[in-house]
Image (cartoon, coloured by chain):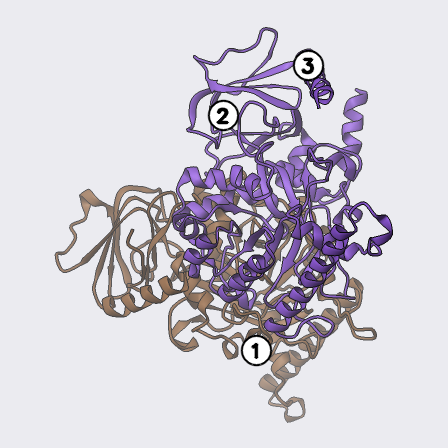
Chain colours: A purple, B brown
Amino acid sequence: MRISLLVSLCAAVVCALGQQTQEAIAFTGARVMPASGPEIPNGVVVIRGARIVAVGAADTTTIPAGARRVDISGKVLMPGIVDTHSHIGGPEGGDSSAPIQPDERILDSLNVRSATISKARAGGVTTANVMPGSGHLMSGQTLYLKLRKGNTIDDYLIHLDNGRVAGGMKMANGTNPRRDPPFPGTRAKAAALVREQYVKAQEYRDKVRQAGSDATKLPPRDLNMEGLVEVLDGKRIVQFHTHRQDDIMTAIRLSKEFGFHVVLHHVSEGWLVADEIAKAGVPCSVIEIDSPGGKLEAKDVRFETPAILYKAGVLVAIHTDDPITDSRLLLRSAALAIRGGLPREEALKALTINGAKILALDQRVGSLEPGKDADLVVLSGDPFSAYTKVLETWVEGQKVFDRANPQDRLYAVGGYGASHDQSDMDLDGEEDRQ
Amino acid sequence: MIARVLIAAALAALTAPAQIAIQGDTVYTMAGPAIRDGVVLVRDGKIERVGPAAEITVPPSYRTLRAAVVTPGLVDAHSTVGLSGYLNAPQDQDQVERSTAMQPDLRAIDSYNPREPLIAYLRSLGVTTLHTGHGPGILLSGQTMVVKTTGDTVEEAMVKPLAMVAVTLGNSARESQKGKSPGTRAKEIAMLRQEFIKAQEYQKKLDRAATEKDKKDSQARDLRMETLARVLKGEVPLLVTVQRANDIVTAIRLAKEFNIHLVLDDVPEAYLVLDEIKASGYPVILHPSMQRAFGDSENISFETAAKLKAAGIPFALQSGYESYVPKTRVVLFEAAVAAANGLSFEDALASITINAARIVGVDNRVGSLAAGKDGDVALYDGDPFEYASHCIGVVSDGKVVSEIRR
């Protein structure tokens, strides 16, 4: 015990020394919106390496000697945006063979060179829960990505302290997973199929526990069961697509029965059961849609949903479901929530710290606080104004989007080639050589 | 949202007959410069007078509405709302009939459901006039029309029963079924040319029969040919929905060959062929700013509206056709994104009011606040393009049809 403490102390010292050698960058002059506290009219944010080291008012915050100063007077600085529900990078989960496929990993399907990821950076998104679709009761394992500039999927992953790669489990109910057998034909059948699998997973987990260290007593490895056990053990949060008020209640009922953590996604009719959701203590990830309908379950969708849920006491994030909403318009979605009555400071949280909490990443991202990842968005003005532009996006101390760069600007506004994959990598290579 | 619209509709019924004075901190008339502290008087359904509050005495019998910003009722230059229902179930989708590739005889008036909830929804966001009808998705899907977003029947809503004939080019006009035409771009154009040549012959026979009274040249009525003949005469524009630059040029080539009045629709790659569009003299109904980047539209840009303006090409914005969620877009929101991407505020507003009315051919009645025009007015509690602003009132033909008190 003592030795390991010593080792970790040494590691901390080495780490700290390492950080000291990295250049500090001080952003000055901006209106800083930390999301963890009140707005700072003339704020300073200092980052070193991948982390934030100081946040405060200009007159009370010490800028380290030798820090590179970036004057962003007149601009707005906010935390990197956390999109709690996205399909950037073309994730694929389960196929048509079964309605419940917890063994599918989108890790094995994602194209990180997709232009959709570059466009998300242009929208200020720095963390995204990328998920398989909603055509299954359970379509697979989601990934919480950091939108660093990387070459392969490994460069985008979040490694948690326990060694796991951060991600959730996608579930859905309502009409999307209803299909011909083996998919469910009714809502009751859908719930029964899900319960059957969770019961199996409980038994599988019991066998594993009983085996203890005796490998001969372990059940044969079953990837589906392993996925579900991770959910039962709270290692994976269920990200549950659900629209209608009764489907919302079914999702809550299942989570209580099996004790899994759940986040309710979309919740088009959440405004009808806001108190029930609040009482269950379940957070919501909400989409704002420009008009009702398009599918039966969304016929009563309304801009007021985030406001109604917030007032009921529910933790609310706002997501894109990209491509349903383009990632470049996520700030706009939060502004639509304000239109529907959500207080401005809550709209900011719904884009940042609340999403981080929903993904259990709030120790690392979601607000401008010392020690957190240096994920920042520089805006030309008020985050919720139609006329505001995302000027820069930073992930872990690296600028990953710069509107002043022509290729980045192409992703921001669109145009010829804006949807072509990988061209940003090519151009960055050119830049490096210059 | 729906409930709010219904309440607004109920209110409208109660408040119908009053004469109305609308006072705005800023009144954008679209018939001249904006008026600070302006008044719009609406009498018997028509605009009576527009001017600065200092110059206009509001008769005491008039009901007064107040707003930060006042604009003409919005004109959606192209939609399928009323035909393409919000449930998106087979029974409420009437915008495309797939039995054959060319159906110019299909009238919009026979498919329009004036009680479709999306109509009331658009109305609550300031839209008072809608160019709607048969949608994109097959080569020649049918006719379009112009309606008001009020009325319990299509007859009550009617402004212009035959506005345009809708054609789609490019990938989305292709038949996916093997052996069915068109299956290529060249086939699309060959089929259209052949059909217009047939219509020319049809018209020639009719003309001969009329002038020479030659009974031999009389012929049975053909509803398809009748419609296309009107297009050939220039009475009815051809609305061509097209995405890629080469397909835009193809549409212009087709229109020039038959001397057709063309309206270019959608055109996400217009910025690649601005000179060609400008030289053609044809107007553009541009895609919604927030339309998704897929397929032939993958090169779509937020800045195209600004580029069309800079090139001097007349254009309007549209809500377009959506096959999923959201089931319709809203021109107020789409113009906001254009205004945020290089288009001036007033040009963005013009693209959903007077310029839309001109391209759709109803500017004699709607699109600006001027004496004698229809009493169609939209009221807002702030900059209409700011996402968090609200459309707080809508007046259509002199009746308050939507009102939100905050």
Type of amino acid at the residue the image marks with label 1: Gln
Q: CA distance from mark 3 to mark 2?
A: 36 Å
Percent position of residue B370, x then y = 32, 54
SS at mark 3?
Answer: helix
Q: Quadrant of the N terminus of chain A?
A: top right
Residue sitting at x 82%, y 56%: A219
Say whether residue A182 is left or right of residue B96: right
Percent position of residue A231, x then y = 67, 51
The residue where tag 3 is placed is A13
Q: Is residue B79 visible?
A: no
> Which mark is drawn over residue A75?
2
Residue sitting at x 68%, y 46%: A88
The residue where tag 1 is placed is B91
Q: Chain of mark 1?
A: B
Q: Nearer the viewer, residue B215 or B195?
A: B195
In the rendered image, residues at marks 1 and 2 fall on the same chain: no
Q: Is residue B144 visible?
A: yes
Q: Quadrant of the C terminus of chain A?
A: top right
Q: CA distance from mark 3 to mark 1?
A: 69 Å
